[in-house]
């Protein structure tokens, strides 16, 4: 029970239950509730209203700039009749609220991109959107008024594959899950450390006496399942990442403020791929048992 508690301390409930193994930045086509909530708050606060006096009441309506943006959106993006455009505060808010909270990612980002590219878009609006995407670790970011994924589908697949393959090495799986959790939380240095520990965990399973990767690679090579030149290349590469002058110490000796998101995502993807490679080679060499289907 104590071991299970220690494992869960570093994971969200979803990650501990295996329902969310990838960091949020790599969950393409997904919108977190945090992103939806913060984006709606941003849009709501950005809309400027004025009061239109009528014979019966004072009716709040959007100001001219947002009226033009939303009317163009109504006709050019939503393809609705212009005479049905409702510029009242309630009509505008209800429609946008539905898109932000209920829309799929295509509608969500398509709407935002229409807004930020509109000639009447307030100057602050794209900057505010970019900050929300970054703070919520969204998988898409805003660059020059265009939304782009922060990583490729292949990077996410590499991590997913490593989590599936790491059944014979539960230590590696837990380190990868923690690295993913730390990425979602924005704890970049912690994520880098856990990513490298995942590789070290597999190395110790291949060669229990090993304190570094070299002996584990040598054992795979001895079995005839790894070419000597490839072993040397991997040993040199990993030696650079773990040496005091290499990537690992260069990153981990600094604070999270100095280790950034790109560093953590790169190391997570690279180490996940390395874990998969070592496990496959270890299974081929008879050093690890493959999971039974």
Image (tube, grey):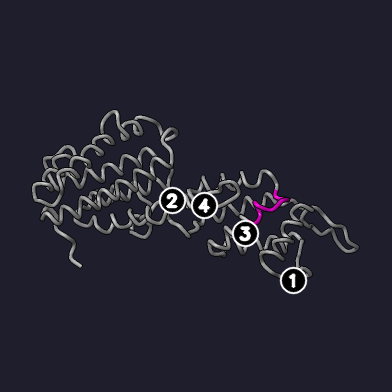
The answer to whether residue 234 shows anywhere in this view is yes
Whether residue 90 sits left or right of residue 272 in the image: it is: right
Which of the pair 17/108 is nearer the observer?
108
**Badge 1: residue crowd in 10 Å (few <14, some 14–19, many ≥20):** few
**Badge 2: residue crowd in 10 Å (few <14, some 14–19, many ≥20):** some
Q: Residue 148 carries which label?
A: 4
| Residue named by callout 3 | 111
Question: In front: mark 4 or mark 1?
Answer: 4
The residue under the point 48% across, 48% down is 137
Q: Quadrant of residue 290?
A: bottom left
Whether residue 82 sits left or right of residue 163 in the image: it is: right
Sequence-first tag of 2 and 1: 1
Considering every residue shown, the one lying at the far left of the view is 222
Sequence-first tag of 2 and 3: 3
Sequence-first tag of 3 and 4: 3
Tell me residue 40's x, y (percent). Answer: 61, 55
Residue range corresponding to the magenta coloring = 114-121
The residue under the point 40% across, 46% down is 183
- Is residue 72 inside the magenta stretch? no
* Secondary structure of the residue carrying numbered label 1: loop
Q: From mark 4 to mark 2, how far is it between C-alphas?
A: 9 Å
Considering every residue shown, the one lying at the far right of the view is 55
Tell me residue 264's x, y (percent). Answer: 38, 42
Question: In front: mark 3 or mark 4?
Answer: 4
Tell me residue 276's x, y (percent). Answer: 25, 53
Q: From mark 3 to mark 1, how far is it between C-alphas?
A: 18 Å
Q: From mark 2 to mark 3, how far is it between C-alphas?
A: 22 Å
Query: Eyeballing the image, is 262 above or below 37?
Result: above
| Residue named by callout 2 | 151
Question: In front: mark 2 or mark 3?
Answer: 2
| Label 2 close to label 3 by CB (< 8 Å) | no
């Amino acid at each position: 029970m104590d071991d299970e508690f220690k494992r869960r301390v570093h994971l969200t409930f979803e990650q501990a239950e295996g329902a969310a193994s990838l960091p949020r930045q790599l969950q393409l086509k997904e919108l977190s509730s945090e992103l939806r909530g913060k984006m709606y708050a941003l849009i709501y606060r950005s809309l400027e209203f004025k009061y239109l006096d009528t014979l019966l009441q004072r009716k709040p309506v959007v100001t001219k700039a947002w009226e033009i943006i939303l009317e163009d959106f109504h006709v050019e993006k939503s393809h609705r009749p212009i005479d049905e455009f409702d510029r009242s505060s309630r009509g505008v808010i209800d429609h946008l609220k539905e898109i932000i909270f209920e829309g799929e990612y295509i509608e969500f980002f398509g709407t935002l991109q229409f807004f930020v590219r509109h000639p009447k878009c307030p100057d602050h609006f794209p900057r505010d959107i970019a900050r929300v995407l970054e703070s919520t670790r969204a998988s898409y970011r805003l660059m020059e008024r265009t939304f782009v994924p922060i990583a490729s589908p292949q990077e996410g697949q590499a991590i997913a594959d490593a989590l599936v393959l790491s059944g014979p090495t539960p230590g590696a799986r837990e380190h990868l899950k923690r690295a993913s959790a730390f990425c979602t939380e924005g704890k970049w240095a912690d994520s880098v450390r856990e990513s490298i520990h995942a590789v070290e965990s597999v190395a110790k399973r291949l060669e229990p006496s090993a304190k570094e990767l070299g002996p584990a690679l040598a054992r795979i090579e001895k079995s005839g399942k790894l070419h000597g030149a490839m072993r040397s290349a991997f040993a040199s590469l990993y030696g650079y990442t773990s040496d005091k002058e290499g990537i690992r110490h260069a990153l981990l000796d600094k604070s999270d403020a100095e280790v950034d998101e790109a560093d953590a995502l790169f190391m997570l993807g690279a180490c996940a791929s390395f874990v998969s490679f070592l496990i496959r080679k270890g299974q081929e060499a008879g050093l690890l048992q493959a999971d039974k289907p």
